[in-house]
Amino acid sequence: MTKISLIGCGRWGTFLGWYAANYGKADEVYMYDIPTSPNFLELKNTRKNAYLTLSDNMFLFDNLAKVLENNFVIISIGCQYFRGLCKELSAYDLNGKTFLLAMKGLEEPSGKRMLDIMREEIKQDIHIATLGGPGHVQDYMRGVPSAAVVDSDEEATKQTVINMMQSNLIRLYYGSDLIGNQIGAALKNVIGLAAGILDGLDWYGLKGALMARAPVEVGRFIKFFGGNPMTAYGLSHLGDYEATLFSKHSHNRMFGEKFARGESFEKLAEGVPTLKAVKIIADQNNIDMPICQALYKAIYEKADIKKTIGELFERPLKKEFQAAC
């Protein structure tokens, strides 16, 4: 019997557990979150959330040791809480286990990727893969298919994850740029903020220009970290634009829209702290990131939104493509 575990019972994590139990190869899924988590309590009390009902082969635990009995573990929590979780995980024997990181963001203020944080905090022989690409729970639960990319620095680990999670609902591709796919996935959330601001200003006609410029800028950032700038045009970044820049289900797009209208948005939008991390790195290393710089001025420095975003799109498009990635 194949048993896997999930840490993090939010919208995306709960879906991945459900998906593994119903479309993947898992016979049983052990799910964990902190006992006081509203998401966990809802699932514990009702066996469902706003998006799905847990299947009979899904089991809830508030004991971290219990879910670490299994050798395949999916992690889907807020990126800014990940280092704390890794410190907690490091107290257990994890040798030989495979971890699939399903979060998309950078730690603030360090700017570090989730995989690097895990390596820093857990000095054991573990296997780590990342998941990136488009898709919303609401669409998947309606049977709308999509694709995603799995990456790792170990080919065998990619194979393990794809064998476990491949289905006709989510087609999984083998990644070839671990750095680029992590950064591309993280920064697509930042670009989602920009798309939402355009929607909030009723400037949605500029989304085409945003889509043309953003991968060039993100490619520049990927190259700084040692990745392939062309990865910005793959599934983890440009391939995720429909779900992040246009979908009504995108938390990052919705944050931007609400922000532009002077309204609050209480749900998790990973692009907001990631934006701060990007700004710090770009400033320290003189990386040309005009979209991110404009967003930072609008969101964190409270600059006039129309003026700041308007000036961004007055930059000649030719200048973006002349700048080397």
Image (tube, rainbow, N blue to C red):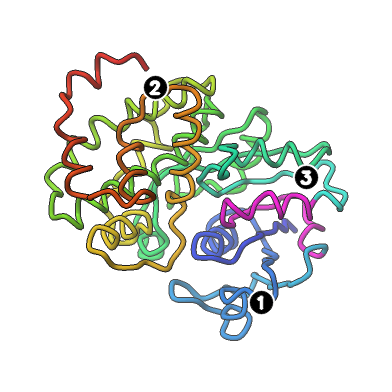
Mark-to-mark CA distance, 1 and 2 = 42 Å
Whether the residues at callouts 1 and 3 have beta carbons within 8 Å, the answer is no
Q: Look at the image and give the residue range highlighted in magenta.
A: 66-89
Query: Which residue is located at x 37 percent, y 52 percent?
Result: 145
Of the residues tagged 1 and 2, which is closer to the observer? 1
* Image coords of residue 198 (percent x, y): 20, 50
Q: Quadrant of residue 43?
A: bottom right
Q: Quadrant of residue 322?
A: top left
Q: Is residue 74 magenta?
A: yes
Residue 230 circle label:
2
- Quadrant into which the C terminus falls: top left
Q: Amino acid at mark 1?
A: Thr
Residue named by callout 1:
36
Whether the residues at callouts 2 and 3 have beta carbons within 8 Å, the answer is no
Work out whether mark 1 precedes mark 2 in sequence or the reverse, and give the earlier one: 1
Above or below, comparing residue 50 to residue 301 in the picture: below
Q: Amino acid at mark 3?
A: Lys
* Image coords of residue 162 (percent x, y): 58, 41
Above or below, comparing residue 284 to residue 246 in the picture: above
Of the residues tagged 2 and 3, which is closer to the observer? 2
Kindly state the secondary structure of the residue where label 2 is placed: helix
Residue 97 circle label:
3
